């Protein structure tokens, strides 16, 4: 293109400006080549004539199109030059508030001077794993690029951060290290990443200070190497420092401060541990007040000092060393305040012996006061023959003092850095590292000294390395794309570097001058002039002989020679060093020892003579380190740094300071351009512009510029050929572009030309569209007007017709109204007369009826009184006779019973009685038979007597009844007459009284009538007032209704808030559970690693085979059901005594628990003995008498037995809890060895309690055998008594022999039982005695320990004693509260158990009552029949599976470990859960708690192992989530709780568990279900997450909708992989379908499926929105359209799967609003209001971020103005939005498992043979 084509009218250009550097203008007249003037119009509408130099013919720089302004990468600009770069940075910084911008391989970071919320962990995770060009520019993107290249290429990396002071270098380096610490955290528990980050506060405290340009300026350079292992986890770090500014210790310029540590220490001087430092405020010390202001706005030095101390502690610096460090720092402050006084001669000086600061200095450093006082004012001169001690002037002494202070601080700084490196050092092998270089940028001031010279020398070296690296990358890119490579001329600064570091260069001449005894700065400057006056990079100033100019790559810098030699020598007198080496503090001495020279003797005193002759001693050579100059050391360290950088892959961060006033988001173009030139950004632009800076891939170019092609030119099968044909037609010069292998390369300006052609094409198309649309609109408007006229005519005619019809209708209605009204008036008169007549009749009839009713009522009352009186008299007489008969009978029977009892006692004491019992049972049976006969005879006689007495009594009663009736008949006639007369008189009085009352009422009626008339008038007036009040009340009611609505709204908000709090609480619990499972997994991994790292012969037990249920739940009561006693004890013993140590309070508590268990054991022993006695007594009574209440006794015995078992089980559970508490406490306190003996005692007590439990169990079994034997002995007696009773007398001999044998066997068994009990009691007694002895020893040790504690307490101060006593009291109360809480839990459990047992017994009682009507005459036969019935009912139980204990492992293996979801896919869903529950039912039916515990424990552990093995298998995870939740629902459904039985059938209620309460197991399964759910979500998210961004944002769901923009260098990121997979929305929906089908096939509850997809859709929304907020290229109108289409497809999928009620759509609301925000208008204030009302789910920060990122894809869209964004911010100012920019895509909603009972009957379940469960038996 020619100049005439480019510089035409309306073309925009850049012209130089002295204030703004570059100013925008527009050409108002076409330029022709050769014109001397260019006519321009500025932005303020003023016109100027721009003169063009005829020699150079340099035209103004062209501006880029608006579509390219604000790009993420400066190399994406079509015109690459300085004004374009500056304008792009300014627009991004001021309008979009973007502080990061790419410039090829460089990240340009502008300091905003404001805290920005773009560095949180959510942003770190958003950039983690992303390619560098995919997201907006960020320091995290550079860090991720370095981390990814290190992992992929296995090559070391470096991040070079440079810039001016105050540009933000330290902060950028800190955030880069934070990224590595977060992404590459250490795999072990050493927390290396925390130590790496902890080094920053320390280095900032000792190496940073306030300057005029920066409040936290780093006054040294540092290079931190972060080491990684083969798994790319941080294992260590190392730090190297460069050129500490030591002069700041003794001098600060105006408005500057010394290093932060001095002010931090002074701010904390009042702490008690710092009293010995003798510090006050920083205002009292000379070294901290030279700047004038000791404070920094917004900085708390005391708080920062606490952070520094915490960092020291974290890095392993002991407290003693910290105090020593602070003493050295305080000594420097005191040294600065030492007053040096000049003597009269002026050549000498002195220091007062009473100088407090010198005394403090010597005390803090541990040196001799007299020596230090002497050598601060004198110096030693050593020659070959003599040694002189020379006095110093006051200025020389002050200089020496300052030099000593600087040297002490420098050595301390070096020591701290070394110890930080030791703390960060690792013994592991380092595989690779990433270095972060935080070094000063190019500096130029009015006065430039030695420090600026070294800084600029370092930047020259870095710039050379940067240029070569950029050049190398450009060459690699050209070769990769197979484009001819032509050499590009770039600025090589090797001559400038040679000037500084070559032989006889500036540094060599400086070192040579320093060796000269009387070398001066002027002599050195003269040597420079003589040596380098002909150099191109060296100049001599015209007006000075003590300065020189070096032309650096960035700018000319004039250096003043004053002080160069002194700073290069860094002279410190050897006498001072010798004194410090002799310090009595080891740390101070170590600072100044080099490890080679011995500590010199300090024999010199102040009394030495001035001239001391040497005894021919060879003068001691100074230390080699002291001979090395600062320049030499810096050159060596810089060479080492460059070698390190050249061996790594560098990444560059250039920090820019936007203004010198530290104003937030203020941009000074002149300062920015100066830094851009200095940091090499413009050099990068120049190198890029020299070749082909604009690069497009063929598909992107085709999509962007296909509008310039004709249809016949498009070849869809070969887009590369199509692009070639297009470019050859549009751009005639072949040198303007090159075709690469995958990209098209353009010269600068060609993309702008193509954009202009594209815009012209669109403009022509728009005109055509506008013409057609306007014609169509006019046609539509005419048709609307015509249709409106016809409609108006139709409605007018209709209106006239309707009005006529209405008049006719009203006339007819009036006639009807008249007719109806007249009829109504006549009817009302008739009804009034009729009602009056009826009322009169009703009152008259009522009066007569009431009179008749009163008469009948009086007669009835009289009869009732008579009836009750007579009945009372008869009952009284009968009760008296009955009581007398009962008393007589009781007295007689008592007398007979006493006689019989006395006789039996006599017989029982006789020896014959025992002989008869031992001989046999015959006499006893004969006696029983006789007694039965006698009782039957007595019963018959008593029945006859009772019948006679009853007949006599009935005759007597009949006789008395007749006499009573006769008596009543006689007496009734007289009483009736008198009563009637009395009634007549009473009625007469009532009548008189009623007449008087009637008259009185009439008078009252008339008076009240008059009053009522008066009040009527008053009421009418009040009515009017009330109407008015009514209106007011209505208004109040309306207002109150509004208030009530507000109250209801607030109430609903409160309820929703409470619900949200509940969800948060559930989420916290589930997050804790998730964290617990993660730590458990990590623990298992560590155990595996430990086991692999150690080799042991023989078999080692795997800890995973122990019960893990105790660790699976956060509930401590779980151990009461599932903890195994022996395993727990074994676990405690295996852990060893070191890990099992506990504190004294826990031991006291556990000992108290042991005592409680001992009391409980004794109570159980007493109850057991009572039960034995009761059983024996019941057995004797059954032998002696035929007790009719046998059923009641047996039920009572079984009840007692079950109570005993429950108490035994409770005791066992308490012991398990205690042991579990021991184990937990032992694992927590693994460092204390003070209570070993107490632990042994407690362990012995636990073992003895365990043995006691075993004894109690044996006794219970013995009791059961006794009850069974008693029942067996009763059964043969029953047929004998019922069947063979008549033949008893004929077979006495035979029966006596059998009974004797049977009795003998019974006695033998009884003796054996008694002997076993006696032995057990003796063992128990011995164990109790042993336990008591050990307990006495424990108490004795405890008393001794308490006495020691008491003696120690008495030695404390009163305040400490009070604090100690309060602490002890708090501990005691805490233990008591825990005991009470446990007691309450136990009581609640017992209450539940007793209620459940009571229900069982009540059910049995009801069954017995129902069976009573069927009682047979023969009672014994009835008992047998009833027992047989119970056995048949037990056989009828269904829905249970029986297995043997040894088959349990096989059952778990087949059902859990080896189970494949495909095996049971064709059966009932959740079949394994049903089978396991049926096995649990059988164990519950058999009352086998060990079997239940073992099966559930094995099942849960097996499920965990399976899930751990298949932790990335979505099908297996879904399968076991369904089965675990189903097993949980079965335990609830069949638990017997009424709350879970409402939907059960009658058969299902019969299948409920009978003996065990598995509520705590339900909690364990619930926690396991939550863990499986979280694993399912994790696996599903891992599958979906790589697909989301590509499908939702990048893939074109609507073809040809989105445009493509030039993306610059970053789309060629070396971390990107060619042929990267892209996903479409259809792929995401297919994956969602697969998830849904899998979960439905496995029978997962619909509610859980809804929660799963709610979580997944939230993740889709969060990831998409986060990428939208971090990517400028996707924030466009077309992306909003694509997003809305994709969201609608997802919503349609939800409706198709009936998941619209899951809340998934609600989770996508922020994304929906973001898509709408991209499409709405963004111009006026009304648009801003609409956006504020629309985007309620987006935070203010997110809305502003999207508006800032919004990018037009063509010229027809407009950018969002800054004023519009400020308007939005103002309207949203009142929102209380979170400060977090990104959504937490890892957030997990709390899951809720609703109870869903199964309708399946267990007895109908079929077990397929493929499961190999043949060993299971149906019951």
Image (tube, rainbow, N blue to C red):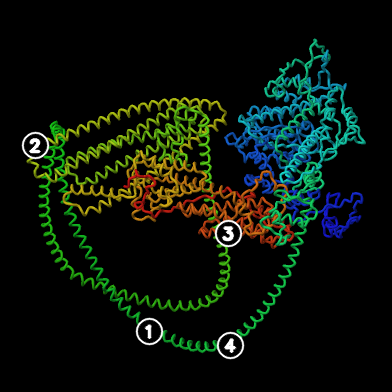
Left or right of 1411 in this view: 84 = right
**Which label's residue is closer to the chain start, 1 or 4?**
4
Q: Separation of disc 1 and disc 3 at Cα?
A: 82 Å
What is the number of the mark on residue 1689? 3
Which residue is at the far top? 615
| Mark in front: 1 vs 3 | 3
Q: Separation of disc 2 and disc 3 at Cα?
A: 101 Å
In the rendered image of this protein, does residue 54 appear above or below residue 1309?
below
Q: Picture coordinates of residue 1788 (x, y %)?
A: 55, 49
* Of residues 1142 and 469, the one drawn nearer to the viewer in this rendering: 469
Q: Separation of disc 2 and disc 4 at Cα?
A: 131 Å
**Which label's residue is closer to the chain start, 2 or 4?**
4
SS category of the residue bearing label 2: helix
What is the number of the mark on residue 463? none
**Which label's residue is closer to the chain start, 2 or 3?**
2
What is the number of the mark on residue 837? 1
| Mark in front: 1 vs 4 | 4
**Which label's residue is closer to the chain start, 3 or 4?**
4
* Of residues 394 and 223, the one drawn nearer to the viewer in this rendering: 223
Q: Separation of disc 1 and disc 4 at Cα?
A: 51 Å
Left or right of 694 in this view: 1180 = left
What is the number of the mark on residue 804? 4
What is the number of the mark on residue 1293? 2
* Of residues 1294 and 40, the one drawn nearer to the viewer in this rendering: 40
10 Å crowding of disc 4: few (<14), some (14-19), many (20+) = few
Q: Separation of disc 2 and disc 1 at Cα?
A: 108 Å
Asked if disc 2 and disc 1 are in contact, CB closer than 8 Å, the reply is: no
Q: Separation of disc 3 and disc 4 at Cα?
A: 58 Å
State the image quarter where residue 10 is shown: bottom right
**Which label's residue is closer to the chain start, 1 or 3?**
1
């Amino acid at each position: 293109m020619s100049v005439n084509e480019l510089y035409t009218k309306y073309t925009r250009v850049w012209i130089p400006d002295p204030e703004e550097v570059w100013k925008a203008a527009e050409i108002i007249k076409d330029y022709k080549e050769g014109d001397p003037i260019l006519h321009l119009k500025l932005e303020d509408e003023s016109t100027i004539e721009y003169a063009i130099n005829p020699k150079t013919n340099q035209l103004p720089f062209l501006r880029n199109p608006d579509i390219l302004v604000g790009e993420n990468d400066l190399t994406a600009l079509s015109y690459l030059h300085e004004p374009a770069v500056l304008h792009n940075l300014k627009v991004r910084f001021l309008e979009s508030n973007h502080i990061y911008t790419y410039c090829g391989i460089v990240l340009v970071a502008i300091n905003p001077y404001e805290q920005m919320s773009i560095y949180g962990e959510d942003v770190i995770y958003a950039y983690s794993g992303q390619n560098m060009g995919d997201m907006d520019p960020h320091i995290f993107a550079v860090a991720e690029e370095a981390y990814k290249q290190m992992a992929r290429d296995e090559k070391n990396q470096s991040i070079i951060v440079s810039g001016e002071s105050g540009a933000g270098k330290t902060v950028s380096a800190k955030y880069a290290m934070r990224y590595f610490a977060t992404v590459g955290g250490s795999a072990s528990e050493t927390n290396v990443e925390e130590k790496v980050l902890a080094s920053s506060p320390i280095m900032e405290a000792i190496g940073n200070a306030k300057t005029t340009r920066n409040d936290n300026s780093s006054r040294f350079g540092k290079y931190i190497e972060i080491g990684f292992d083969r798994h790319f986890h941080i294992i260590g770090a190392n730090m190297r420092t460069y050129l500490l500014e030591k002069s700041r210790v003794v001098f600060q310029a105006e408005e500057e401060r010394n290093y932060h540590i001095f002010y931090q220490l002074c701010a904390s001087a009042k702490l008690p541990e710092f009293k010995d430092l003798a510090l006050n405020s920083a205002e009292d010390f000379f070294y901290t007040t030279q700047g004038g202001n000791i404070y920094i706005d917004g900085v708390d030095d005391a708080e920062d000092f606490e952070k520094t101390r915490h960092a020291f502690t974290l890095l392993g610096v002991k407290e003693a060393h910290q105090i020593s460090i602070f003493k050295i720092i305080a000594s420097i402050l005191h040294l600065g305040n030492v007053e040096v006084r000049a003597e009269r001669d002026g050549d000498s000086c002195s220091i007062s012996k009473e100088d407090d600061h010198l005394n403090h200095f010597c005390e803090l450093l541990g040196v001799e006061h007299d020596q230090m006082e002497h050598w601060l004012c004198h110096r030693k001169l050593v020659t070959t023959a003599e040694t002189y001690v020379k006095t110093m002037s006051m200025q020389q002494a002050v200089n020496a003092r300052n030099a000593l202070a600087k040297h002490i601080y420098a050595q301390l700084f070096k020591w701290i850095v070394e110890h930080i490196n030791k703390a960060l050092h690792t013994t592991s092998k380092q595989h690779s590292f990433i270095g972060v270089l935080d070094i000063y940028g190019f500096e130029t001031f009015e006065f430039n000294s030695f420090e600026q010279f070294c800084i600029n020398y370092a930047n020259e070296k870095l710039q050379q390395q940067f240029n070569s690296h950029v050049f190398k990358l450009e060459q690699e890119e050209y070769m990769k794309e197979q484009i001819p490579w032509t050499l590009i001329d770039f600025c090589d600064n090797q001559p400038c570097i040679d000037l500084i570091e070559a032989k006889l260069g500036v540094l060599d001449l400086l070192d040579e001058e320093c060796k000269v005894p009387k070398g001066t700065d002027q002599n050195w400057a003269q040597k420079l002039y003589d040596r380098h006056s002909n150099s191109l990079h060296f100049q001599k100033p015209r007006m000075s002989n003590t300065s020189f100019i070096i032309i650096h790559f960035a700018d000319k810098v004039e250096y003043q020679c004053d002080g160069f030699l002194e700073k290069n020598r860094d002279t410190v007198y050897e006498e001072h060093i010798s004194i410090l080496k002799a310090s009595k503090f080891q740390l101070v001495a170590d600072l100044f020892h080099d490890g080679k020279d011995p500590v010199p003797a300090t024999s010199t005193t102040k009394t030495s003579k001035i001239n001391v002759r040497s005894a021919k001693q060879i003068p001691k050579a100074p230390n080699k380190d002291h001979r090395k100059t600062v320049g030499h050391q810096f050159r060596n360290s810089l060479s080492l740094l460059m070698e390190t950088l050249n061996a790594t892959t560098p990444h560059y961060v250039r920090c820019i300071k936007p203004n010198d006033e530290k104003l937030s988001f203020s941009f000074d173009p002149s300062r920015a351009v100066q830094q851009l030139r200095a940091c090499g950004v413009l050099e990068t632009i120049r190198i890029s512009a020299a070749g082909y800076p604009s690069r497009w891939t063929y598909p992107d170019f085709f999509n962007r510029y296909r509008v310039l092609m004709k249809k016949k030119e498009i070849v869809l099968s070969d887009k590369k050929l199509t692009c070639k044909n297009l470019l050859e037609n549009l751009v005639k010069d072949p040198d303007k572009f090159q075709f690469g292998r995958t990209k098209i390369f353009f010269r600068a300006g060609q993309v702008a030309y193509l954009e202009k052609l594209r815009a012209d094409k669109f403009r022509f198309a728009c005109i055509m569209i506008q013409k057609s649309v306007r014609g169509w609109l006019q046609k539509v408007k005419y048709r609307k007007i015509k249709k409106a006229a016809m409609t108006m005519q139709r409605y007018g005619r209709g209106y006239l017709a309707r009005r006529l019809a209405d008049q006719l209708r009203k006339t007819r209605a009036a006639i009807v109204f008249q007719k109806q009204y007249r009829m109504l008036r006549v009817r009302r008169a008739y009804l009034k007369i009729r009602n009056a007549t009826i009322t009169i009749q009703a009152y008259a009839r009522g009066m007569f009826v009431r009179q008749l009713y009163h008469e009948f009522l009086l007669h009835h009352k009289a009869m009732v009184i008579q009836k009750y009186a007579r009945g009372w008299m008869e009952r009284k007489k009968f009760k008296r006779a009955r009581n007398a008969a009962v008393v007589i009978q009781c007295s007689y029977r008592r007398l007979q019973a006493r006689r019989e009892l006395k006789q039996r006692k006599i017989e029982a004491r006789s020896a014959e009685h025992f002989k008869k019992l031992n001989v046999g049972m015959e006499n006893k049976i004969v006696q029983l038979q006789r007694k039965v006969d006698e009782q039957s005879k007595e019963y018959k006689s008593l029945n006859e007597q009772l019948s006679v007495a009853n007949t006599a009594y009935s005759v007597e009663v009949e006789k008395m009844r007749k006499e009573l009736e006769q008596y009543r008949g006689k007496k009734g006639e007289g009483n009736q007459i008198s009563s009637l007369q009395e009634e007549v008189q009473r009625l007469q009085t009532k009548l008189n009284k009623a007449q008087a009352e009637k008259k009185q009422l009439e008078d009252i009626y008339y008076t009240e009538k008059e009053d009522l008339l008066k009040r009527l008038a008053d009421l009418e007036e009040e009515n009017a007032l009330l109407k008015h009040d009514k209106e007011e009340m209505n208004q109040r009611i309306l207002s109150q209704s509004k208030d009530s609505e507000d109250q209801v709204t607030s109430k609903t908000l409160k309820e929703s808030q409470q619900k949200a709090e509940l969800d948060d609480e559930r989420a916290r619990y589930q997050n804790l559970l998730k964290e617990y499972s993660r730590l458990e997994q990590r623990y298992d991994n560590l155990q595996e690693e430990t086991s692999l790292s150690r080799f042991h012969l023989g078999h080692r037990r795997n800890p995973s085979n122990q019960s893990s249920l105790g660790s699976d739940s956060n509930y401590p009561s779980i151990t009461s059901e599932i903890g195994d006693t022996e395993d727990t004890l074994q676990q405690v013993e295996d852990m060893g005594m070191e890990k099992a140590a506990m504190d004294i309070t826990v031991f006291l508590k556990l000992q108290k628990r042991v005592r409680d268990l001992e009391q409980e054991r004794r109570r159980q022993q007493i109850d057991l003995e009572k039960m034995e006695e009761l059983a024996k007594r019941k057995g004797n009574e059954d032998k002696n008498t035929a007790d009719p209440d046998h059923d009641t006794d047996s039920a009572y015995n079984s009840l007692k037995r079950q109570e005993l078992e429950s108490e035994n089980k409770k005791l066992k559970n308490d012991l398990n809890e205690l042991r579990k508490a021991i184990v937990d406490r032992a694992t927590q306190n693994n460092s204390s060895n003070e209570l070993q003996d107490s632990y042994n005692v407690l362990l012995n007590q636990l073992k003895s309690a365990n043995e006691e439990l075993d004894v109690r169990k044996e006794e219970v079994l013995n009791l059961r055998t006794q009850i069974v034997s008693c029942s067996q002995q009763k059964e043969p007696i029953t047929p004998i008594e019922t069947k063979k009773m008549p033949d008893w007398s004929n077979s006495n001999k035979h029966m006596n022999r059998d009974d004797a044998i049977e009795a003998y066997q019974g006695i033998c068994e009884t003796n054996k039982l008694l002997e076993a009990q006696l032995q057990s009691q003796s063992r128990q007694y011995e164990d109790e005695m042993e336990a008591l002895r050990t307990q006495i020893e424990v108490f004795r040790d405890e008393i001794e320990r308490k006495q020691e504690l008491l003696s120690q307490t008495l030695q404390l101060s009163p305040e400490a004693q009070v604090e100690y006593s309060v602490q002890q009291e708090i501990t005691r109360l805490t233990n008591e509260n825990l005991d009470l809480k446990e007691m309450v839990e136990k009581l609640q459990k017992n209450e539940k158990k007793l209620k459940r047992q009571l229900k069982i017994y009540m059910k049995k009682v009801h069954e017995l009552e129902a069976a009573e009507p069927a009682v047979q005459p023969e009672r014994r036969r009835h008992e047998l029949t009833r027992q047989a019935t119970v056995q048949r009912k037990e056989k009828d139980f269904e829905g249970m599976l029986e297995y043997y204990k040894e088959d349990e492992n096989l059952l778990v293996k087949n059902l859990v470990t080896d189970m494949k979801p495909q095996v049971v896919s064709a059966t009932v869903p959740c079949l394994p859960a049903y089978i396991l529950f049926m096995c649990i039912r059988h164990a519950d039916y058999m009352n086998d708690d060990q079997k239940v515990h073992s099966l559930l424990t094995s099942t849960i552990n097996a499920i965990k192992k399976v899930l751990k093995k298949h932790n990335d298998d979505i099908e297996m995870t879904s399968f076991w989530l369904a089965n675990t939740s189903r097993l949980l629902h079965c335990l609830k459904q069949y638990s017997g709780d009424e709350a879970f039985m409402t939907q059960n059938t009658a058969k299902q209620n019969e299948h409920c568990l009978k003996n065990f309460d598995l509520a705590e197991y339900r909690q364990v399964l619930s926690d396991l279900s939550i863990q499986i759910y979280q694993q399912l979500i994790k696996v599903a998210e891992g599958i979906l997450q790589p697909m989301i961004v590509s499908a939702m944002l990048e893939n074109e769901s609507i073809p040809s909708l989105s445009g493509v923009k030039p993306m610059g260098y970053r789309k060629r990121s070396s971390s990107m992989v060619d042929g990267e997979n892209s996903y479409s929305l259809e792929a995401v929906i297919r994956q969602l379908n697969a998830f849904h089908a899998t979960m439905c096939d496995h029978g997962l509850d619909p509610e859980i499926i809804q929660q799963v997809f709610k979580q997944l859709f939230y993740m889709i929304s969060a990831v998409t929105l986060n990428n939208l907020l971090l990517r400028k290229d996707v924030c466009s109108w077309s992306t909003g359209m694509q997003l809305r289409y994709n969201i609608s497809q997802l919503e349609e999928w939800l409706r198709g799967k009936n998941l619209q009620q899951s809340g998934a759509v609600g989770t996508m609301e922020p994304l929906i609003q973001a898509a709408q925000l991209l499409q709405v208008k963004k111009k006026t204030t009304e648009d801003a209001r609409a956006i504020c009302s629309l985007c309620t789910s987006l935070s203010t920060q997110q809305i502003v971020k999207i508006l800032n990122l919004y990018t037009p894809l063509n010229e027809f869209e407009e950018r969002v103005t800054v004023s519009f964004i400020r308007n939005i911010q103002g309207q949203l100012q009142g929102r209380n939005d979170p400060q977090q920019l990104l959504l937490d895509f890892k957030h997990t909603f709390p899951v809720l498992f609703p109870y869903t009972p199964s309708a399946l009957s267990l007895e109908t379940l079929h077990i397929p043979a493929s499961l190999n469960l043949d060993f299971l038996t149906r019951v």
